[in-house]
Image (tube, coloured by chain):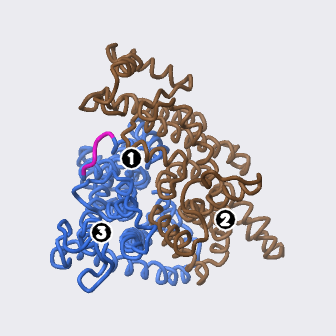
C-alpha cells in the first residue's frame, strides 16, 4: 500500500515536464507497462479459469513418488506426498488470484464509500472518518493480520475479509480528495438547487465521476493483497484446504526444501508466479494512473 | 497533508488503546474456552494450580470492566504476563529477542536509506532517460517480490549452493573465539536477513526521493540558482538534494516501523531469534499471550518511529515550523 500511494503521487511530476516530453514519457512507460501488465494478468487469469484443462494431474491426489525431481511425467517434480507441483501451481492461481481480487474489491467498496461520505460531508463526518483512516494507516498491517488470523482461524473467507478490511484506507483518501473538488462544481450545485437529495447526488452525480479512479486504486490494491495473502499463507495461516502459491511455499519451508537441490522446481516457480501476479497488477495500475490521475488533469488546465 | 501535531499525538494514543483493547477482547469474546485462549496451551495439559492461576490473573469471574482496568494496570507496569507454554515471563522473552530485531532492522534501514537516496537522485536527475526508466522498472520489480521468497532463494543459492554465508540463526551455536571473531560471526549471520529486508524497503525510499527531487527540480529557486550561473554540481548537491531530504527522512522513520512487521517473514525464513520469529513461533504453537505481547511491542515501535518522524521533519525543513 505504501508504495502504491507513492507511485500515485509520483505522477504529478509529469505536469512539470514540457508537453512534448510528456507525450514521449507516456509512450515509454505508460503504454509499455500497460500492455505488459495486461498480458501478464490475462495469462494468469486464463490459467486459473482453465486450471482443470491445463494441469496434468489432480493436485490433491498422489500421482507419483514423493520428492521426485522433474521428469517427462512431472514437469516440476512432486512434493513430499507425491502430488504434482505443476498442477498445484496451476490450481493455486485460482486461490491466490481470487483472494487478491476479492479482497481488493472489498477494500474498494469500503474505501469508495468512506471517501464519498468524507468528501461530501467534510465538516464533522469527514473529519471523523479521515481521522479513522489515519489511524488505520499507522497500525502495522502484517502483525495485525497475523493476530486476527490466529484468533479467527484459517479460512479463505476470513483471509479475504481481513485483508480487505485493512487495505482500504489509501483508496478512501484518494477518493475523498477528488470528491472535495467535484462537490464545488456547478452541476452539483444545480442538482442541489432543484432539490435533489444527498443520496441522489452522491450516487448519480458524484459516484460516476470517481468510479474510474476507484478502479485504478483497486488494481493497485490487488498487487498488495496478493503479496499479503502470500505472506499469510507462508506463515501457515492460509486455508489448509485451499492451497495458494503461498501455501506451496509454506510446505517447502516446513520440509526444508530450500536446503536441497529441489528448490529449483519447488521454491523458484511459486515465488516467480507470485512476483509476476503482483507485478502485472502493479504495472496495470501504473498505466491506468497515467490516464486517470486527477492531479494530472487539474494541473494541465 | 499531515494533521497538526496535537492531533497526531491523539491519533497515536488512540492506536495504542485500540491495540491494547484488541488484545484484551479477542481472547475473551471469541467462541471457545477463554481459558485456552488466554493461557495459550491445551486446557487438558494444564495442572489445576495453573488453571486457577490463569483464572485469577485474568480475573475471569469478575466483571469485564474490572478485568479491563487490571489489564491496563499490569501493562503499564511492564508486565506482559506469563507464557505457560515456554514457562517463562513474557517480558523477559521479549527482552531477549528485541536486540536482534533492532540489529537487523537498524542495519537494513541504513542500507535502504543510502541506496534509496542515491538511486532516487540518479533517477530524478536523469528523468525519462534510460537510466531512470531502468531504475524505475527494477524498483517496481523489487517491490513485487515476496520478501520471504527472496530470503529462501538467497539461502538456496548463497548458503547452500555456494556455501558462502550461514543460513540459520544469529550466531554459530557454541562458538568459542576472541571478541572480534564473535563479532564477525554475528555479522556474517546478519548479512542475508539484512539484504532481504533492504530489498523490500529500498523501493519505497527510492520512489519518495525521486518524486520529491523531481518536484524540487521544477521549483523556481532552482531556476534562479541555475541562472545565477552556479555549476550543475552545486545546484545538485546544495540546492536539489538538500531540499529533497526531509520527506525521505519521514518515510524512513515510518519504514522503520513497517520493517518491524516485515521481520516476521524474514526472521522466520532465516530462523533468526528476533521478535518476528517469536510471532511465528507463538502462532504455530498457539501461544496467544506471547503473540499478543509481541504485537503490542511492534505497534509501540511503529508509533515511536512515527513520533520520531514528526519530530525530525521540522528540524530538516524549517519551512514546516511555520505551520
Q: Nearer the viewer, mark 2 or mark 3?
A: 3
In this rendering, would A135 be left or right of B170? left
Q: Number of marks in the image?
A: 3
Dot 1: within a 10 Å radius of its alpha carbon, few (fewer than 14), some, or many (20 or more) residues?
some
How far apart are the alpha carbons under marks 1 and 3? 28 Å
Q: Is residue A206 visible?
A: no
Height in image: B315 above or below A287?
Answer: above
Residues under numbered marks 1 and 2 in contact, where contact means CB atoms less than 8 Å apart: no
Task: Give the labeled residue for mark 1.
Answer: A145
Quadrant position of the C terminus of chain B in the picture? top right
Q: In front here: A194 or A135?
A: A135
Height in image: B146 above or below B323?
Answer: below
Give the residue drawn at x 53%, y 66%. Answer: A10
Give the residue drawn at x 36%, y 17%. Answer: B52
Question: Does residue A160 belong to the magenta stretch?
Answer: no
Task: Give the labeled residue for mark 3.
Answer: A79
Residue B99 location (% of width, % of height): 63, 44
Q: Disc 2 is attached to a residue of which chain?
A: B
Height in image: A85 above or below A200?
Answer: below
Q: Identify the element where label 1 is drawn.
A: helix
Which of the two labelled residues, at mark 1 and mark 3, occupies the earlier sequence position? 3
Give the residue drawn at x 23%, y 48%. Answer: A200
How far apart are the alpha carbons under marks 2 and 3? 43 Å
Magenta extent: A151-155
Dot 3: within a 10 Å radius of its alpha carbon, few (fewer than 14), some, or many (20 or more) residues?
many
Q: Is circle 1 on the same chain as circle 2?
A: no
Q: In front here: A88 or A25?
A: A88
Q: Identify the element where label 2 is drawn.
A: helix
Q: Chain A is drawn in which colour?
A: blue
Residues under numbered marks 2 and 3 in contact, where contact means CB atoms less than 8 Å apart: no
Kindly indicate the quadrant of the structure image that contains residue A102: bottom left
Amino acid at each position: 500500500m505504501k508504495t502504491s500511494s507513492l507511485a500515485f503521487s509520483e505522477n504529478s511530476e509529469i505536469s512539470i515536464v514540457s508537453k512534448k516530453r510528456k507525450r514521449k514519457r507516456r509512450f515509454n512507460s505508460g503504454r509499455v507497462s500497460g500492455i505488459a501488465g495486461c498480458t501478464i494478468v490475462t495469462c494468469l487469469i486464463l490459467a486459473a479459469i482453465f486450471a482443470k484443462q491445463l494441469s496434468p494431474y489432480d493436485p490433491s491426489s498422489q500421482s507419483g513418488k514423493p520428492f521426485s525431481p522433474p521428469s517427462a511425467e512431472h514437469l516440476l517434480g512432486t512434493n513430499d506426498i507425491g502430488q504434482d507441483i505443476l498442477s498445484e501451481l496451476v490450481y493455486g492461481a485460482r486461490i491466490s488470484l481470487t483472494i487478491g481480487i476479492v479482497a481488493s474489491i472489498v477494500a474498494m467498496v469500503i474505501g469508495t464509500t468512506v471517501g464519498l461520505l468524507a468528501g461530501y460531508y467534510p465538516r464533522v463526518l469527514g473529519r471523523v472518518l479521515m481521522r479513522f483512516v489515519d489511524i488505520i494507516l499507522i497500525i502495522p498491517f502484517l502483525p495485525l493480520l497475523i493476530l486476527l488470523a490466529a484468533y479467527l482461524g484459517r479460512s479463505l473467507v476470513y483471509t479475504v475479509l481481513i485483508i480487505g478490511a485493512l487495505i482500504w484506507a489509501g483508496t478512501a483518501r484518494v477518493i475523498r480528495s477528488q470528491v472535495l473538488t467535484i462537490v464545488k462544481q456547478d452541476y452539483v450545485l444545480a442538482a442541489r438547487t432543484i432539490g435533489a437529495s444527498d443520496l441522489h447526488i452522491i450516487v448519480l452525480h458524484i459516484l460516476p465521476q470517481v468510479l474510474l479512479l476507484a478502479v485504478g486504486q483497486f488494481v493497485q490494491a490487488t498487487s498488495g493483497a496478493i503479496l499479503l495473502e502470500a505472506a499469510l499463507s507462508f506463515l501457515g495461516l492460509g486455508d489448509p484446504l485451499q492451497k495458494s502459491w503461498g501455501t506451496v511455499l509454506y510446505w517447502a519451508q516446513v520440509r526444508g526444501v530450500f536446503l536441497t537441490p529441489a528448490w529449483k522446481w519447488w521454491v523458484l516457480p511459486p515465488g516467480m508466479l507470485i512476483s509476476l501476479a503482483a507485478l502485472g497488477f502493479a504495472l496495470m495500475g501504473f498505466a491506468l494512473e497515467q490516464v486517470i490521475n486527477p492531479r494530472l488533469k487539474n494541473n494541465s488546465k | 497533508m499531515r494533521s497538526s501535531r496535537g492531533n497526531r499525538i491523539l491519533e497515536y494514543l488512540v492506536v495504542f488503546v485500540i491495540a491494547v483493547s484488541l488484545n484484551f477482547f479477542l481472547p475473551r469474546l471469541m467462541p471457545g474456552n477463554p481459558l485456552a485462549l488466554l493461557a495459550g496451551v491445551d486446557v487438558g495439559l494444564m495442572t489445576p494450580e495453573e488453571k486457577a492461576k490463569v483464572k485469577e490473573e485474568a480475573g475471569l469471574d469478575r466483571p469485564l470492566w474490572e478485568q479491563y482496568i487490571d489489564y491496563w494496570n499490569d501493562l503499564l507496569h511492564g508486565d506482559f504476563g506469563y507464557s505457560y507454554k515456554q514457562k517463562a515471563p513474557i517480558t523477559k522473552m521479549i527482552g531477549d529477542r528485541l536486540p536482534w530485531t533492532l540489529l537487523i532492522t537498524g542495519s537494513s534501514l541504513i542500507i535502504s536509506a543510502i541506496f534509496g537516496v542515491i538511486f532516487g537522485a540518479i533517477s530524478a536527475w536523469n528523468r525519462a532517460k534510460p537510466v531512470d526508466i531502468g531504475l524505475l522498472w527494477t524498483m517496481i520489480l523489487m517491490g513485487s517480490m515476496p520478501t520471504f521468497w527472496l530470503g529462501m532463494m538467497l539461502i538456496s543459492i548463497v548458503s547452500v549452493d555456494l556455501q558462502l554465508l550461514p543460513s540459520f540463526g544469529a550466531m554459530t551455536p557454541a562458538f568459542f573465539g576472541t571478541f572480534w571473531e564473535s563479532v564477525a560471526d554475528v555479522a556474517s549471520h546478519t548479512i542475508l536477513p539484512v539484504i532481504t529486508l533492504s530489498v523490500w524497503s529500498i523501493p519505497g525510499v527510492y520512489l519518495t526521493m525521486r518524486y520529491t527531487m523531481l518536484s524540487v527540480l521544477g521549483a523556481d529557486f532552482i531556476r534562479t540558482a541555475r541562472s545565477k550561473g552556479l555549476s550543475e554540481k552545486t545546484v545538485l548537491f546544495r540546492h536539489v538534494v538538500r531540499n529533497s531530504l526531509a520527506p525521505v527522512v519521514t518515510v524512513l522513520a515510518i519504514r522503520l516501523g513497517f520493517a518491524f512487521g516485515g521481520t516476521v517473514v524474514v526472521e522466520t525464513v532465516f530462523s533468526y531469534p528476533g521478535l518476528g520469529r517469536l510471532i511465528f513461533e507463538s502462532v504455530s504453537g498457539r501461544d496467544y499471550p506471547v503473540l499478543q505481547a509481541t504485537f503490542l511491542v511492534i505497534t509501540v515501535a511503529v508509533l515511536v518511529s512515527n513520533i520520531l518522524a514528526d519530530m525530525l521533519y521540522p528540524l530538516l525543513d524549517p519551512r514546516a515550523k511555520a505551520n
